[in-house]
Amino acid sequence: MSTRTVIRGGLVITASDELHADVLIEDGRIAALATSGTAVAEGWTAERAIDATGKYVIPGGVDAHTHMEMPFGGTKAADTFETGTRAAAWGGTTTIVDFAIQSVGGALREGLDAWHAKAEGNCAVDYGFHMIVSDVNEDTLKEMDLLVQEGVTSFKQFMAYPGVFYSDDGQILRAMQRAADNGGLIMMHAENGIAIDVLVEQALARGERDPRYHGEVRKALLEAEATHRAIKLAQVAGAPLYVVHVSAMEAVAELAKARDEGLPVFGETCPQYLFLSTDNLAEPDFEGAKYVCSTPLRPKEHQAKLWQGLRTNDLQVVSTDHCPFCFVGQKELGRGDFSKIPNGMPGVENRMDLLHQGVVDGHISRRRWIEIACASPARMFGLYPKKGTIAPGADADVVIYDPHAEQTVSAETHHMNVDYSAYEGKRLTGRVETVLSRGELVITEREYTGHAGHGVYTPRSTSQYLN
C-alpha cells in the first residue's frame, strides 16, 4: 500500500542547499521537490499532508557508530536494537551502522550472523553493520573480501584493549593491505593500549582509583601517537583510514597534517567530546563513572579545536559511539577500581539536537550540521544518496525540525534504556517534531508511531570518498 505524502512550507536543508520547498514522497522515496507556492507544488495531491511552516525539513540522521547489546567487561550495553533504534528515531536519526564483533578464534561470518540475529525484526529504523576484526589470520583476510562484496565494507581494529580486541602493528598492516585491495575502509580505535595498561597498573598501585583517573592514564599523547602510527601504517599499505572518536587536539593535528599531504585519512568525533570534559569525570561520589568512555573526555580546551576541525573538514563526521551502561549495577562494577568501569556512554538520541545547538552557538553552519550528521556519514560508508539527503530517488527519511523549540535534556524524558543522561539539565534550542523513515511516520508530532521491524538491514557500497 503506497501512501503519497506532501510536506509543505518548510525550509529544506541539505549539506549543499537551503531552499523553501515542498517535498513529495511516494512509495517510500522522495519523488520531487518544488518551490513552495508555485503551481507545480500546489498541484500535488496526497493522502497525507504535513505542514512544516516555520520548521526545517532535513534528512534523517545517519549515526555511523553505535553499539547496541554490546558485551563489554562482563556486562552488555543496556540498549537493545529495539530500544536503541526507537531512541534514535526520537532524536531524528533514521539510520544506524552498528558493529558486529568477531570473537578471537572465531570467523567474521559467525560474528556477523550473531549481530544479524540480534537486529532482525527488532529495529524501528534502518541499520547496517561494520565488522570488528579481533583476530587477523589468513581465513579472516579472505572473509574480508566476501563481506565487502555483500555490503559490509568497513572493518574496525583496536590499538587499545590488549587481551580483548587488540591488534598489533603487523595484524593492522595485513588488514590494511587487504582493504587496499578489496575497497574496504579500516576504522581505527587509536590509543596506545600497551602503554595505557602500564599507566593503569601504576595508578592503581598508587591508590588512584576514582573515575577521574580513567582520563589521566589514557593520555592525549597516547591517542596522538597511535593516530600517527595508524596513518603511517595505512600509508605503507596504500589504504584509506578512518579514525573513530577523536577526542584530543593532538590527534586532530595528526589528521590535519596527513590530509594536507593528500592522504585518504578521515576523522570522526562525538558530541561528548564537544560538550563534556574532564570536569565531568571528576564529579564527586563516583558520579564521574557516568562519563567513562574511551577515548576519554579531555580538558575543556580541546573542545574549540574539535569544533575547528569540523569547520575546516579535518574532521568529517560526528557519530555517537552510543554504548550505554546503567549507573546502577553496571557503571558501579568499577567502584574502587576505575579500570573496571564499563567504557561507554549513551547518546544516540541527543546527537542531532546537540549539533543543532552547535549551530545556535555559532560553531557551525546549518548546512555543515547536516553534512557532518547526515550526508558525510552516508558518503563515508556507502549509503549516499539513498540516505543522507533530500533529493528525488533518495529514501524518504525526513525529519521536521523545530529550530525554536526549547528543551531540557533529562533521563526522565529520554527514550534510551539507561538510567542517566550524560547531558542532564542541559538547555537546548531546537527539537525533533516528526520523523519519517522510508515514508512511514515513526515520530508524529512528538509521539512514537513506529514499530519494531519497520527498520531493515541496508547493505552498503564502498566509501564514496574513495571512488
Image (cartoon, rainbow, N blue to C red):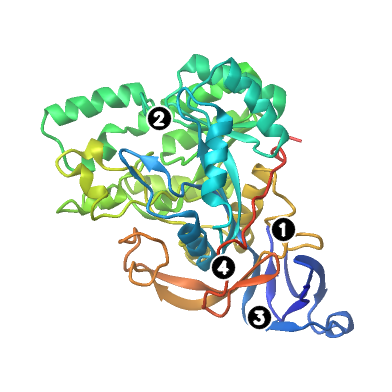
Q: Kindly identify which numbered label has been placed on residue 451.
A: 4
| Residue bearing mark 3 | 52
Residue 334 position within the rendered picture, expressed as x and y whole percent measured from the top left: 21, 42
Disc 4 residue type? His
Q: Which mark is residue 191?
A: 2
Whichever of labels 2 and 1 marks the residue nearer the N terminus, that label is: 1
- Identified at 63% across, 19% down, the residue is 177
Which quadrant, please, contains the N terminus? bottom right
Q: Residues within 10 Å of mark 3 (few under 14, many from 20)?
A: many
Q: Is residue 57 left or right of residue 311?
A: right
Q: Residues within 10 Å of mark 1 (few under 14, many from 20)?
A: few
Look at the image and tell me in which quarter the C terminus lies.
top right
Q: Splitting the image into 4 quarters, where does residue 197 fall?
A: top left
Query: Any mark on residue 16, and which?
Result: 1
Q: 78 above or below 207?
A: below
Instruction: Give the SS element for disc 3.
Output: loop
Q: Secondary structure at mark 4?
A: loop
What kind of residue is marked 1? Ser
What is the C-alpha distance between the residues marked 3 and 2? 45 Å
Cα separation, mark 2 vs mark 1, equals 34 Å
CA separation in Å, label 4 and label 3: 24 Å
Tell me, for residue 42, which label it has, or none. Answer: none
Distance CA(mark 1)–CA(mark 4): 32 Å
- Report the amino acid beneath label 2: Glu
Considering only order in the chain, which callout, 4 or 1, is on the residue closer to the N terminus?
1
- Dot 2: within a 10 Å radius of its alpha carbon, few (fewer than 14), some, or many (20 or more) residues? many
Query: Element under label 1?
Result: loop
Q: Nearer the viewer, mark 1 or mark 4?
A: 4
State the separation of the CA atoms marked 3 and 1: 20 Å
Which residue is nearer to you in this view: 2 or 309? Answer: 2
Mark 4 or 2 closer to N-term? 2
Q: Earlier in the sequence, mark 3 or mark 2?
A: 3
